[in-house]
Image (spheres, rainbow, N blue to C red):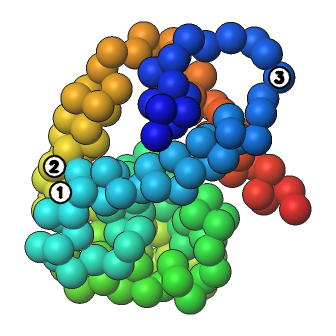
Amino acid sequence: MARIENLRTGKLDNSPLTWGDIAFLAHNMAFASGPLSLATGAVTDRYDLGPRGTWVINLIAIGLNHPHELAETLNIGRSLVSFELGKLSAAGLIVSEQGERDRRRSKLALTPLGEETLQEVRNGLVGLVTEALGHYKPKELRICARILSDMQTALRST
């Protein structure tokens, strides 16, 4: 247990990574989704959303308005995206409109209830990050975000 506590709070250096360092990193990456799920859980439960529902709301809000974009970003198949969109639509959080140029492509948008829910999700995430990670500098959190993004990119390139 002392070794784990040292990895968690001990002095950081630039020595080569050991297996302990890599295992500690992998373990924490694997279980980091727990607190995120707690931060968004009230919305997920209230609207009976799928496991990615609150993330889809955020993605639509930033301009990923087509199902194929969501599938690519979430690295999931279209059937799972359809499942998530069905739950969000049934909850009244999103609407889907036919594309003007290509009638086969739908464009997604948040409803007014979806906009309110988006703010609730964002507030939960801001609270989590502020409380759990507020002792880090903004630059350090941005570096962490890039590191995690690099892991996602590595996954997609295999």
- Residue at the spot 61% in from the left edge and 41% down from the top edge: 25
Three-letter amino acid code at the position of disc 2 = Glu
Q: Whole-percent x and y of residue 2?
A: 48, 32
Three-letter amino acid code at the position of disc 1 = Thr
The number of numbered badges drawn on the structure is 3
Q: Does the rendering let one see residue 114?
A: no
> Residue 144 occupies which quadrant of the picture?
top right
Q: Which residue is mark 3?
A: 16
* Label 3 element class: loop
> Residue 73 occupies which quadrant of the picture?
bottom right
Cβ–Cβ below 8 Å for labels 2 and 1?
yes
Q: Which mark is residue 117?
A: 1
Q: Residue furthest right?
A: 158
Q: Nearer the viewer, mark 2 or mark 3?
A: 3
Which badge, 1 or 3, comes first in the chain's sequence?
3
- Marks 1 and 3, how far apart at CA: 45 Å
Q: Which residue is mark 2?
A: 120
- Residue at the spot 60% in from the left edge and 82% down from the top edge: 78
Three-letter amino acid code at the position of disc 3 = Pro
Looking at the picture, tell me which residue is in the foreground, 103 or 146.
146
